[in-house]
Amino acid sequence: MKKHYFLFFSFLLFASFIKAQDFAVGCNGNRYIDDIFTETQLTEGVVFGEAVNSAGMTQTLKMDIFEPVGDTETERPVIIMAFGGSFIFGDRTQMHDVCEFYARKGYVAASIDYRLWNLFTQGVPDSLGILDVVVKAVHDMKASVRYLRSDAAANNTFGIDSDIIMVGGVSAGGIAACQTGMMDESDDIPQFIRDIIEDNGGIEGMSGNPGISSEVQGVINMSGGMYDVTWLDENDPPILSMHGTADPTVPYGFGLANGIMTINGSGNVHIEADAEGVPNYLVTVPDGGHIDIYSEPIYLTSQEEFNTQGMAFLESVLCGVTNTKEISADIDIQITPNPATDQAVLHISDVTETYDIQVFNQIGQLVYSKFDNVNSQVTLSKSDIGTGLYFVQIRLADSNSMRTETVVFE
């Protein structure tokens, strides 16, 4: 019976994580998690589009692309990153270190331009001005996705898998990525925002490479957020986030970003993603600020969580269970009581390595996760998971082996 559950669960992962696509190449339990390459190759200034900026000038849009040196794979997942700076300042070189971080793990990573508000010629923007430049940034990010898909279909210059493109960014870049991944025509978008979108060429914009899908398969949100979390629904891509609870620039929950535009930060995005059954992982930084949480030593524990467990989350999205083996029958795993009313305890014996737990509902949506466990018992609560039948995936960190059990909460 356990084997049947395991096969069924594998199908659910395939259906819910990488919809209508193959898993990423090279999945082996290390790639996409660890630094498996020591050097990266940079291609600078790749033009992916052009568009009229907020000052009325035509701007050429470029990206810098990082690839791992010595990689034999030729169809690799892509992460497109956008810099921060309140949609007023910044440039694509700010994300070079982040792109190198991903390239060393086996991704192709690109740092992009997007159009900014010109503070010197336009003065301080009001809320409508910022919304307009956010829409422009989203359109530019969509154009970068379309460019890479177009290139892959023609020459595949950068050796990518055009079915697996993720977007992300820090601060303003994270906001652009969230809207790129989650906002679409079917959402209940206020008319004044729809007017701004239409003034900029519609939901896809006019930044280049028309007629190609801009759909993305994942979002990396670093101190960003969504204008309206109700735009997030069960068909949206998985989300990896990190955010400080004392962020004065983009609130962790809900508030004004830079005192200008209301926004839902990563905390609210996480709550809505859980409610909609969208796979997501949030690193909450207690008392953390805005950008300092990514560099200051005081936040090292959170940085390590994002760089290890966050990468493991993305790898699980990309690779599913294709790179795992069954946990040895010598390791006894039980869930008691089962069925349970309020709590159930996962018992795991004779394990000498850390292990991760992820709980999925019957349609393959992630509802609960707990990483890097070391104790022989872990308590699962109905208040965290819900009522019904659930699949509990136990994955050993070092041996990359896995078993799936079921639990019922009444």
Image (spheres, rainbow, N blue to C red):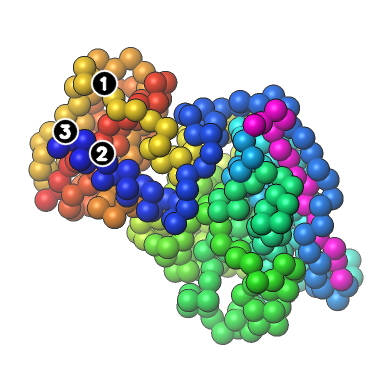
Residue 283 in view of the camera: no
Q: Mark 1 highlights which residue?
A: 328
Q: Start and end of the magenta stretch? A: 58-72
* Mark drawn on residue 6: 2
Q: Residue at x 54, y 81 (%)?
A: 190
* Mark 2 Cα shell of 10 Å, populated few (<14), some (14-19), many (≥20): many
| Horizontal and vertical percent position of residue 53 | 81, 71
Q: Amino acid at mark 2?
A: Phe
Side of 156 relative to 31 (left or right): right
Under circle 1, the secondary element is loop
The three-letter code of the residue at mark 3 reads Ile
Where residue 292 sits, quadrant-wise, is: top right
Label 3 crowd (10 A; few <14 / some 14-19 / many >=20)? many
Q: Secondary structure at mark 3?
A: strand
Q: Position of residue 366 (x, y in %)?
A: 35, 48
Which residue is under mark 3? 335
- In this view, the residue in front, 358 or 157, is 157
Q: Nearer the viewer, mark 2 or mark 3?
A: 2
Q: Nearer the viewer, residue 121 or 340?
A: 340
Looking at the figure, which quarter contains the N terminus?
Answer: top left
Residue 388, which numbered label? none
Give the prevailing secondary structure in the magenta stretch. Answer: strand
Where disc 2 sits, the SS reads helix
The CA distance from mark 3 to mark 1 is 17 Å
The residue shown at (72%, 67%) is: 209
Question: Going by the image, does 378 lie left or right of 179?
Answer: left
